[in-house]
Image (cartoon, helix red, strand yellow):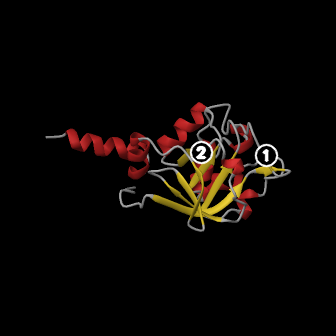
Amino acid sequence: MDNGNKLFKIKGKAWKIEREGKLIDDIDTDMIYHNKYLHIVDKKEMARYAFSNLDGWKNFPELADSDGILIVGENFGCGSSRQHAVDCFISLGIKAIIGKSFGAIYKRNAINSGLAIFECRDIDKADIRTGDEIEIDIKTGNILKNGKRVARAKPMSKIQLDIYKAGNLFEYAKKMEKSFMP
C-alpha cells in the first residue's frame, strides 16, 4: 500500500470519546478491544468490536463513519500490547486519533501500523464537538475547524511521517531496502 501521494492534511468527522462532557482518560486496550475477541484475525471483522468493552461506546462501530477522527483523553491505549486495539480502528476507516497522551506501546503500534496519531495536551479545550468536520495538518500539527485553528498538536516526527506516507512500517522497510540495493 503506497500512500506517498497522501496530502499533508487529514480531514474527517470528529468523535469525542467522552462521558458527561469530559474526555475519558485511561482507556486501556481491553476497553478498546476486549480480550474475548482476540481469536478474530480478519481485520475487516475486527471493526465490529471497537470499544466493545467501553461503557457508553459499545455501539461505536455502528455509528462510526469511515472518515472519523477520534478525540481522546489522557493515557489512551494503556495496558497490553494488543495490536487488535489499533487494527480495529484502521478497519473501521478511522483516519486519525488526537489524544492528550497515549500509552507508549499503543503509540508505537499505531505509528508502525500507519495510523495517524497526534498528541495535543489541550484538545479538551478546543471548540470541537462530535460531528464537527475537522482537519489536521500533519506537518504543523494545526487542527482546524471551518478553516480556523482551534488547537495545535505535536506534528509528526520525520520517521512517523515517512511510515505514515508508506502505509505502515513494513512498506516503509521495503522502500528503505530498495534504496540500499545496487
Answer with the quarter of the image where residue 67 lies: bottom right
Residue toward you, 89 or 142:
142
The tag on residue 54 is: 1
- Badge 2 crowding class, 10 Å Cα cut-off, few under 14, some 14 to 19, many 20 or more, is many
Q: Is residue 132 visible?
A: yes
Does 85 appear above or below 4?
Answer: above
- Residue that lies at the very extreme toward the right in this rendered image: 20
Question: Where is the C terminus found, in terms of image quarters?
Answer: top left
Q: At 36% from the left edge and 44% from the top edge, which residue is drawn?
A: 172
- Secondary-structure class at tag 1: loop
For badge 1, the amino acid type reads: Leu
Residue beneath disc 2: 86
- Secondary-structure class at tag 2: helix
Using residue 80 as the reference point, say whether residue 57 is left or right of it: right
Q: At 49% from the left edge and 46% from the top edge, which residue is drawn?
A: 155
Q: Give percent across and percent down for residue 167.
A: 42, 51
Q: Give percent across and percent down for residue 74.
A: 70, 38
Q: Give percent across and percent down for residue 135.
A: 55, 61
Count of number-bearing discs: 2
Answer with the quarter of the image where residue 86 lies: top right
For badge 2, the amino acid type reads: Val
Residue toward you, 159 or 40:
159
- Badge 1 crowding class, 10 Å Cα cut-off, few under 14, some 14 to 19, many 20 or more, is some
Residue toward you, 116 or 29:
116
Question: Where is the N terminus found, in terms of image quarters?
Answer: bottom left
Q: Is residue 33 visible?
A: no
Residue toward you, 130 or 144:
144
